[in-house]
Image (spheres, rainbow, N blue to C red):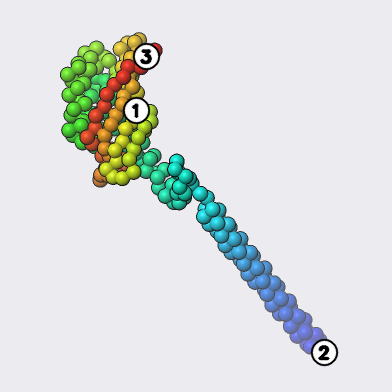
Amino acid sequence: MKNTKSLKGYDDLIDGKKTVKFMILFVVGFSIIIVLSSLYFSYRLHSKAIDTVKVIDSEGRVIPSEAKRNQDVFIASLQAHIANSLYYLNTFDRNSIKENQARALFLVDKKSADRIFNSYNTTGAYNDAIRNSYIYASKFVKITSVSSKEPFSVEFEGLLEITDGDRIVKNKVIGKGKVRYNTPSFPYNTQGMLLYDYLQTYEEVQK
């Protein structure tokens, strides 16, 4: 009789463990289903939201959101390349002339770069930097025009500041040229573009 009770108690313990194990598996499985369902519905909601976004161009035409993102990336890369080109072509002091000229040749075709270097040499700008400690510093301002197909015809504005002691002369730089894709070169040309057939003019900024 005592053995029978012991066996019955052991069977109850086994049944209890099975029940607990079943409940754990049920809870885990149910949790997994809830998580997967949440992820699925979140994905569907995100996809639907993306599909319903409409980007309108200046002529009222709908631009696909993916095309809009690609255009944004292109414009950002173009701005970065032009900013670097403008900087290394037109920024120098007595210690950085040769280095910045070399950096510019990774970004701009040699013919265009030499034209600008020669103009600074002819006007005495390099001599002023070396002998009189003039500092030329340029920066990109904005793109004013860019075509939609490669090679991209581009026009832009920059600012050139010439520092002579306490005196600063500011000139607006108006640049015009073409841009095509080129082999990237880290860290000198990370955008993988080349500015060529480039010309620039200057307009003094009135104080």
The vertical placement of 105 against 164, above or below, is: below
Quickly name the residue at label 3: 206
The vertical placement of 66 against 4, above or below, is: above
Image spot of residue 159 (x, y percent): 34, 23
The vertical placement of 124 against 198, above or below, is: above
Image spot of residue 192 (x, y percent): 29, 43
Amino acid tagged 2: Met
Q: CA distance from mark 3 to mark 1?
A: 16 Å
Q: Is residue 127 left or right of residue 17?
A: left
Q: Nearer the viewer, mark 3 or mark 2?
A: 3
* Mark seen at residue 1: 2
Quickly name the residue at label 1: 157
Are there few (<14), some (14-19), or many (20+) residues within 10 Å of tag 2?
Answer: few
Q: CA distance from mark 2 to mark 1?
A: 103 Å
Quick one: label 2 or label 1, which is nearer the N terminus?
A: 2
Quick one: label 3 or label 2, which is nearer the N terminus?
A: 2
